[in-house]
Image: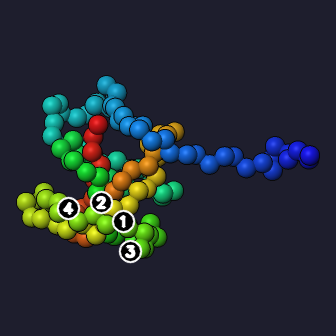
Amino acid sequence: MAQIPAEESQPEPKRARRGFHPTLSLLEEDKMGTTQPHDDALVITFRIRDYDVKRVMVDGGSAVKVIYLDLYKGLGLKPEDLTPHSFPLMRFDGKLVIPKGMIRLPIQTGPKVVEVNFIVVDTYFPYTAIVERP
């Protein structure tokens, strides 16, 4: 059996681990220049489905992970990629929104890749996604 030279071998793709819950933490030096305590939104960049997605809001009070329809389409996903999800959600302004569906997507936070169930909604929001804070 022939051996493949190291420069031709392909690295194994990263696989998502189920049950892994990434932890986001800040160091003391990250707080420099801020007023404490604060109630500002934490907005970060996540790697979702091999794309760097900016303006992801981390919400400690969110019970679900949400992506907005513009991001869903921007990731090249189609309506047939969704699974049904019809439980209404409450927007920040108190209005109800009916989800388009749900999709499981890989996200990367640091060296780890995990799969996350996102609920897709068609409504305006200045962020591209909302994730919960553990």
Q: Is residue 83 toward the left or the right of residue 112 in the image?
A: left
Q: Is residue 4 toward the left or the right of residue 27 in the image?
A: right
Which amino acid, mark 3? Pro
Separation (CA) of disc 4 from disc 3: 18 Å
Q: Are marks 4 and 3 in contact (CB under 8 Å)?
A: no
Which amino acid, mark 4? Phe
Q: Which residue corresponds to the image point at 48% horizontal and 57% vertical from the top-left?
A: 49
Separation (CA) of disc 3 from disc 2: 13 Å
Q: Are marks 1 and 4 in contact (CB under 8 Å)?
A: no
- Report helix, strand or loop for mark 2: strand
Q: Are marks 1 and 3 in contact (CB under 8 Å)?
A: no
The residue labelled by disc 4 is: 87
- Report helix, strand or loop for mark 3: helix
Residue 67 % position (x, y): 31, 60
Which amino acid, mark 1? Thr
- The circle drawn on residue 83 is 1
Separation (CA) of disc 4 from disc 2: 10 Å
Q: Residue furthest right?
A: 1
Separation (CA) of disc 2 from disc 1: 10 Å
Crowd tier of the residue under label 2, counting other residues whose Cα lies within 10 Å: few below 14, some 14–19, many 20 or above: many
Q: Earlier in the sequence, mark 4 or mark 2?
A: 4
- The circle drawn on residue 79 is 3
- Report helix, strand or loop for mark 1: loop
Image height check: is 133 above or below 103? above
Q: State which quadrant residue 26 falls in.
A: top left
Residue 43 % position (x, y): 29, 48
Which of the two residues, 19 or 24, is positioned nearer the viewer here?
Answer: 19
Q: Are marks 2 and 1 in contact (CB under 8 Å)?
A: no
- Report helix, strand or loop for mark 4: loop
Figure quadrant of the C terminus? top left
Which amino acid, mark 2? Ile
